[in-house]
Image (cartoon, rainbow, N blue to C red):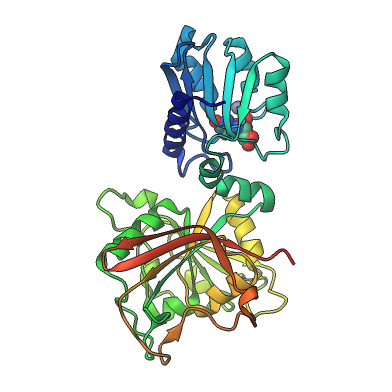
Amino acid sequence: MVSKAETRAMKKALKLALHGRGSTFPNPMVGAVILDRDGNHAGDGFHRKCGAPHAEVIAIASAGDAASGGTMVVTLEPCCHHGRTGPCTDEIIRAGISRVVIAMTDPNPRVCGDGIKQLEAAGIEVETGLLSEEARELNRVYQHYLETSRSWVTLKIALSLDGRTAAADGSSRWISCERSRRRVQRMRASAGAVLTGAGTVREDDPELTVRLPDTMSGSQPVRIVVSSTGDFGESWKIFRNPGRVIIAVPEGIAAHLTEYTDLPGVELWEFPADSVNQGIDLTSLFERTALEGISSVLCEAGSDLSTRLLKAELVDSVSIFTAPVILGSEGRPAFKLLGIDSIENAIRLDNVSSRRSGSDFLTEGNVVYRAD
Ligand code: AOF
Ligand code: ZN
């Protein structure tokens, strides 16, 4: 049984964990709260940064002697291995904590249930599964990385009411309202990178930067442009702002793309060619971004790239703005053919949220791909 105080403490731990957003990857965001033996708040902590002390250790330190005989409420199963830091289970046992309430087991194969076993072997009462859905959503990027070695990919689209992204002539400024566009700026700020295709650069000349009052140039997301030829030219806005710009091209052509050599911040990344489509193997791109410490990539692309990403099952979540605008079937569709022949083959979302965004609606959810 879980007490009301423990449920409140878990909510607080989940909130605390969020303070680590953007700096813990590839490690998880974790929050911990310690209640003393009378159920009163005695201390708390969160994981600030990959390689820094774990949430549990910080919470124990902040509780001091009050941890003894108390309860630890933590969003993730405590670790029992020596990684960048020592095992948290040892610290919990040493602090004399008598009960541990955990939201979710750690999918890390080096922990994966063994942390719980060690605590129980030391005579500590363990309860698992409190607010587990919230905890899983909190650490979807961490879990996804453990399973795939890739960055998390979010596809952002602004649609008319009838599902079009631009009018027949390609004009799309502005389908969504100002509030939605500001929200996109915040999405960019919290993504490690923003991705688009060379076609969108040529057509829309987007900046792909964050222009919020509190964003310094140093914290701009990395801008990534995928191109099958790389020769879309350098007179675009993406090259004008400070920060990293990556041009992702097929193997063997980077050496010929000398027009970018003198542009500050511009890097050419080569990838194997896609075996089916023209262009690069996109799976390799997201493996590379993950290796570079980029936890998530926000894709703001046209229908070609968006379709390829969905077909390759590389889109992990979507953020779709629907605006009160009608463009007719002569407007540009969000996706090309996806090979969906029947409703049972539709791509569906889970963990869906739907809310107003000024005069638009924002629907967000994680993409569920069929197992077969
Ligand atoms: C964290 N922060 O608060 C907790 C983690 O490389 P290390 O030593 O930092 O260990 C990383 C692993 O520790 C991580 O994958 C997860 O299994 C476990 N718990 N990690 O970074 C924390 N509690
Ligand atoms: Zn730990």
Residue 125, position as x, y percentages in the image: 63, 19
Residue lying farthest to the front in this orientation? 1
Q: Quadrant of residue 238?
A: bottom left
Residue placed most toward the observer, 362 or 223: 362
Is 324 left or right of 54, judged from the image as shown?
Answer: left
Residue 357, position as x, y percentages in the image: 31, 62
The answer to whether any part of residue 281 appears in the image is: yes
Is 354 left or right of 178, judged from the image as shown?
Answer: right
The answer to whether any part of residue 223 appears in the image is: no
Picture quadrant of ligand 1: top right
Residue 324, position as x, y percentages in the image: 30, 76
In the rendered image, the quadrant that contains the C terminus is: bottom right
Q: How many tags in the picture?
A: 0
Q: What residue appears at the point 42 percent right and 64 percent down from the top-left corner?
A: 363
Residue placed most toward the observer, 88 or 48: 88
Q: What residue appears at the point 26 percent right and 64 percent down from the top-left corner?
A: 358
Q: Is residue 16 above or below residue 60?
A: below
Is 266 left or right of 253, judged from the image as shown?
Answer: left
In the rendered image, the quadrant that contains the N terminus is: top right
Residue 211, position as x, y percentages in the image: 29, 58
Q: What residue appears at the point 64 percent right and 35 percent down from the top-left corner?
A: 105
Q: Is residue 338 above or below residue 21?
A: below
Q: Is residue 134 above or below residue 271?
A: above
